[in-house]
Image: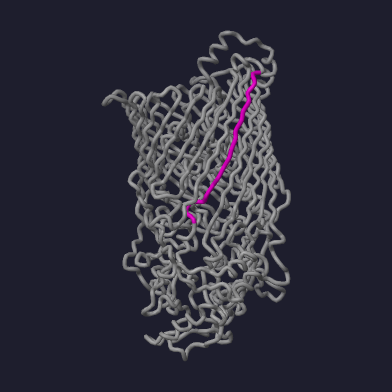
Amino acid sequence: MSVEVSCLPRCSTLTLALLAWLCTPLVALAQATSEPVTEASQATTQELDKVSVTGSRIKRTDIETALPITVIGKAEIDAQGISSAEQLMSYLNVSGNGSDNLASNVGIVTGVDQRGNNGVSGANLRGQGADATLVLLNGRRVAAHGLKGRVVDLNSIPFAAIERVEVLRDGASAIYGTDAIGGVINFITRSDYRGLTLSAFTDTTEEGGGNIHRGNLLVGGGDLDTDGWNAFASFSYKKSEILRGNDRDFSNAFQPERGLSPDTRGTPYATVANRPASTPTLIGNGLIDPADRSTQQYINPLDLPGAAGCESGSGNGLMGPYDHVLWGVASARYACAYDYPAAAVMQQPVESKDIIGRATFRISDRHRMFVEFTGSEVDVEKTFEPYQISPGTVFNASTFYPRTGAAYDEVYDALAAYFGAGQLNYGAPIAYRWRCTACGQRQIATNTKSYRILLGFEGQIGSWDYNAGISRASSKSTSTLGGGYYDTAKLRQVLGSGLLNPFLLPGQAQTPEAMAALADASADGTDLYGGESIMTSIDASVSGGLGFSLPGGEVQLATGIDLRREEYDFGGNQPGEGDPDDPFDGIYLAPFDNGNILRNVSRDTKAVYAELYLPLLDTLELTLAERYDHYEGFGGTENPKVSFKYQPLDGLAFRGAYSTGFKVPTFNQLFYGEALSPYTGLDLADPATCPGGVASPTVPGCESIQPDLLTGGKQDLDPEESRQKSLGVVIAPVDWFNMSVDWWEIKREKTIRSGISIDTLVDNYDTFASNFIRDGNGNITAIDQRYINSGGSLMRGIETDINLTLDDVLGGDWRVHLNGSYLDTYRTKDLGTLPYTDNLVGEYVRYYSLPIRWKHTLGVSYLRGNWTQSLTQIYRGGYKDEEPVSVRNGTFIPSNWDPDVSSYTTYNYSVSYKGLDKLGITLGIKNLLDEDPPFTAHMNDYAAGAGWEPRVADPRGRAYTLALEYKFY
C-alpha cells in the first residue's frame, strides 16, 4: 500500500484561533466551580468513566481512536516471562533492532555518542533511535540518563509496578513534544492500591549464566470513597547475572570457512612480532620461511610445523590460528589469534533497586490531589577482553621481553629449530603481541541514581476535566574503572623487567612477584567520569465539550501548557590524564572523556498546544492539533497534526494521520569539545587541485597530504525536522474477530550526525569546501568532521494486528493474536542535495537499527477454569550479511561463505493457575526449542557478538521461569 497525504500549511492560524476560542469556555469554567454536583451527574460519572489514552489529551468514553496504539497488559507481560522494560522492547515488533540493549553495548567505548552505553537500555520505535522516541511514566516525562544526556534509561523504570504499557505507533509531536518522532511509549503504574502483595520471579537458563531474579513488595491502604485518601508503595529488587561469551558454543569467531575469524595476533601465549632493523629484536624485521622464502613477521611458536598448535595456548578455547588468507596478511602464516569477541560478555550484570510511591487525597467529590515519587539505583558492570600489548610507541623497546626472562630460551629454541639460528639475534629482546590475561578482564562499573517527584491535581470543573502537575526529575551517573586497567608508566616498568611472562601455557602461572608488581600498577577504583541530567517541569491541561455539536456529536477540545527546564552537567577526571610531560602516562586505554566536560548547561522550553475533536458525521471524525514550542537558543516552532477516522459500517473503519516533528540538538552535539587527531594515511590529496582527492606522486597537484581531523560539537547546528504519515483500516465484522492494517512513513531531514566520512567530503568538495581548513598559503591544515546537519532518512512500513476469540471450544476459551511489522523502505542520504541510497531493507547495517523486513509475534492462549496456557512464536526475518574483507576485495571466498543470515524463530510457553485463594502461580519455558541465534560473519571490530547478532537474538537459550504472587490481604 502506498498512500500520499497532503500536507497542512505550517502556520500559526490554527493555534491562535483555538486559543482565542478558549476564552469563552475558560470563563465558564471559572463560574462552574461554585455549581453544586447533582446526583444525576455523579451517577453519570460512575457509569461512564472517561479515560485518557496515549496519543490524545481528550478524555472520552469511546477509546477507539484514529491512531494505532498497542496496549500490553500486566497479564501478557507475566505470561511471556518479561522481567524488564528492555526485554519488553525486544518483544515488540514496532521496536527497531538497534544497539539499545545491554548485549549490544558490551565493548569499550569512548566519546559522547557511546559513553552512555555504560548501562543504558533505550526505547527505539520504528528504528528512529532512542533519542527520537519519547518515554513517559504515567503520561509525563522522566529525566534522560546522566551520562548520555539525551536518552531515557529503561532500567530506571519501576517495571514490577507496571499495570500496562501503551505504545503509540505514530508521531506525537503535536501533543507530547516535538521530539516524539518515532512514537511514544507510556509506562503506566497503578494509581491506587489497598492490601499487601509479595511477588517473586526467576528466569533461570538451562545452560547456566544470565539468570534473572526479581522480588517485589506492594503495600497500600486507604479508600478514596470512604477515607478520602489512598497511599501505596512498591519496592523492587532485581538482579541479572553475567553471561560470558564463552558460556555458549555458538559464540565463536573461529569459523574462517564461513568468513569469520578474529583479526588480532595478540594471544594469551604471545605471538613474536617484527620490528624495523633499526630496533634490535630477536627476529628483527622478520624471518625467511624455508618452505617458500616468504618473509614472516608475526610468528607464534605454537603454530610452527610440528608444534602443539595455537589451540594449546588457551585453556578456554579462545585461541586459534590466525587466518592470514582471509585477512590478506601473508606475513602472519604462523601467527595465532585470540577470540576477543567471545571473550567479551554477552549479558552485562545488572543490579537494580527501585521504589514508586503515590498518595492521593480527595479534596472534594470532583477534585483530587496526588503526590508521586519514583526512585531507582542501578548498578551495571561492563566487562570485556584483557589488554592487548603490542610493540609500538607506548610499549617501545624498553618494554620488550628481555634476555633475562624465564621463557626467553624456550622461544629462541622453537624459532631456531624451524627458521635456523643464523636468522635470529640471540640476546636481543623479543617484541611481541600478547593478550595480557594476567591483567584480567577490563571492567567499568556504572552507578545511576534516578528520581522523580511529582505533585499533581486532577478532577472536573463543570463538564471539563483538568490535570496539572509540577515535577522534578534527575538521573545521576558515575562510571568507575574496575579491574583490568593499569597505570601506563608502571605497566611499562613491569613489562620491561621481565617479571611478567607472556609465554605461558594453560596450567602455568605468573610468579607471585609478577602479580604483586601488577597489582601495584592497578587503577582499580579510579573515577572515569560522571554526569547528571535534571528536568523541572510544570504542565497543565483541560479538556471537555465546547457546548455545541456537529452531526456526529459534541465538539471537544483539549489545551494545555508545558514548561520545562533541562539541565545537564558532565564531569571528567582531570587527574586521569596523567603527567602532561609524558604523553603515555596516565591509565592505559582508559576511555576518559575530559575534552567534553560540560558544566551546568541548561535550556528552557515553553510550549502551548491545542487539540480539537470534530465529529463531522456519525461515521466521520476529525482531530486537529497543533503545538507551539519555544526552545531557548532556537526560537519557536509550530507542529500540526491531523487525524481522522471514517467508519462507514459498524465493523469497518479507516484511519489516518499526518504530523510534523522538530528535534533540537542535544547539549553534547552543541558543546562537545573540539579535538584534533592526525590523518595517518598517505592516500589523500587536496581535492581543490586533485579531482577525487586520491594521492599520486606522479600527478602535479596530487601530492599526499596529512592534515589534522577536527571533531566535536558545533553551536550553529540546526534542529532536525520530520514528517510522519499513516493510513490504516480496522475490520471487525463479528465480535470474535478483528484486524487492523496500518501503513506509515517517516521522513527526517537535517539529521544530526558526527564524523561524516572523508570520502563524502572529498566527493562533494564544492559543497564542503569550507570544511577544508587552510593556512595563509592555501595549504590544508585540518578537515572539519564535527557534527553537521546531514541529508536525512526515509522509512516506510506496514503493521498488522489480528485477533481471534473462540469461546467454549474443546472445553475452554481460545485467544489467537498475530502482530506483525513489515518494513518496506529504508533509505538515507548524506546531503539534502544528494539522492537517497538504495533501499537498505534486508541489508546489514552497522551501528544503527538493523532493517529487518518482516517480524511477527503469534500467540495462542487456552483458558479453562483457573488454568491458562499460552504458546507464543516470535519471528525475526533474515537479511544479507556483511561481506568479509576478502570477499569484498575479491581476493578470497571462504568455502562455506553464505551471504544470507537465516531467520530467527523462538517459542515461549507458559501455564498459569489462579485457583488458590491468595496465591497466583505462572510457570514458563522461554525459547522452548533451545534455538541458537543465526550465524553472522559481521566484523567484530565494529559490532558485538562472536558469530551472532545481539540486535536480533537472545543469547541465553532455553530458560525456565517461575512467577509467584501472594496477596496477604
- Toward the viewer: 952 or 102? 102
Of residues 75 and 746, the one nearer the viewer is 75
Magenta segment main secondary structure:
strand
Q: Residue at x 46, y 34 (%)?
A: 72
As for residue 564 lying within the magenta part, the answer is no
The x, y position of residue 822, in whole percent, is 39, 45
**Which image quadrant for residue 926?**
top left
Residue at 35% x, 49% y: name it: 931
Viewer-nearest residue: 578 or 104: 578
**Over which residues does the magenta segment extend?**
345-362
Q: From this viewpoint, is residue 688 visible? A: no
Render colour scheme: one colour
Apparent side of residue 126 relative to residue 254 in the rendered image (left or right)? right
Q: Is residue 637 above or below residue 922?
A: below
Q: Residue furthest front?
A: 512
In which quadrant of the rendered image does the N terminus lie? top left
From the viewer's perspective, tell me whether residue 291 is left or right of residue 430: left
